Amino acid sequence: MGALLAGSAGTLPATLVSPWPGPAALCLAAMGFKTSSPVFWTIPQSYLDARIAALAIALVNSLGNLGGFVSPTAFGILQDATGSTRGGLIGLSVVGVLAAACVALVRGGGQHERARGRRPRDRDHGPGRGPVRGGPARVR
């Protein structure tokens, strides 16, 4: 959420300040938006059951690819409507704030474990953490 807000905070000043600090503001925006991407991909896995997580990740990836078409098109439409790149950058800043608000709404992680009525255990997470057959006995 903080990375998305940092990206939006970098995009908005790039439209409002003089041209000299604009590239520095766009660098802040790029750092914010690029660092939010890997953190985003952990969200579906923490909320969904392992059986449907792959399907949900594929759906998110498909929508992201669709966004690769919609975003430049919307940027061009806003640029044509306003006559400068300011409209597109302000639109990008608004979308970043909306994305941060959506992340704030789904914050909490691991809801599918609580919905099934059991607490997650250490051996439930990660490869090789389950009981080993024929191995040494575990002392609890």
Image: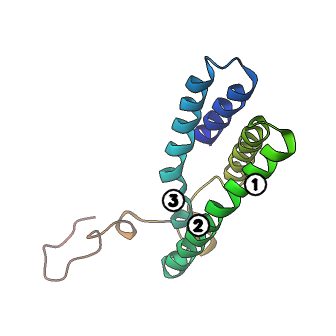
Residue 65: mark in rendering:
2
Q: Nearer the viewer, residue 113 or 86?
A: 86
Sooner in the amino-acid sequence: mark 3 or mark 2 = 3
User: Marks 3 and 1: which is nearer the front?
Assistant: 1
* Label 1 sits on residue: 74
Q: Position of residue 111 (x, y in %)?
A: 61, 64
Which element type, helix, strand or loop, lies under badge 3? loop
Q: Disc 3 marks which residue?
A: 41
Q: Earlier in the sequence, mark 3 or mark 1?
A: 3
The amino acid type of the residue labelled 2 equals Asn
Quarter of the N terminus within the rendering: top right
Which numbered disc flags the more N-terminal residue, 2 or 1? 2
| Secondary-structure class at tag 2 | helix
Question: Label 1 is placed on what type of residue?
Answer: Ala
On the image, the x and y values in percent for residue 119 come to 51, 66
Question: Looking at the image, is 136 positioned above or below residue 26?
Answer: below
Residue 69 in picture, x, y percent from top left: 65, 63
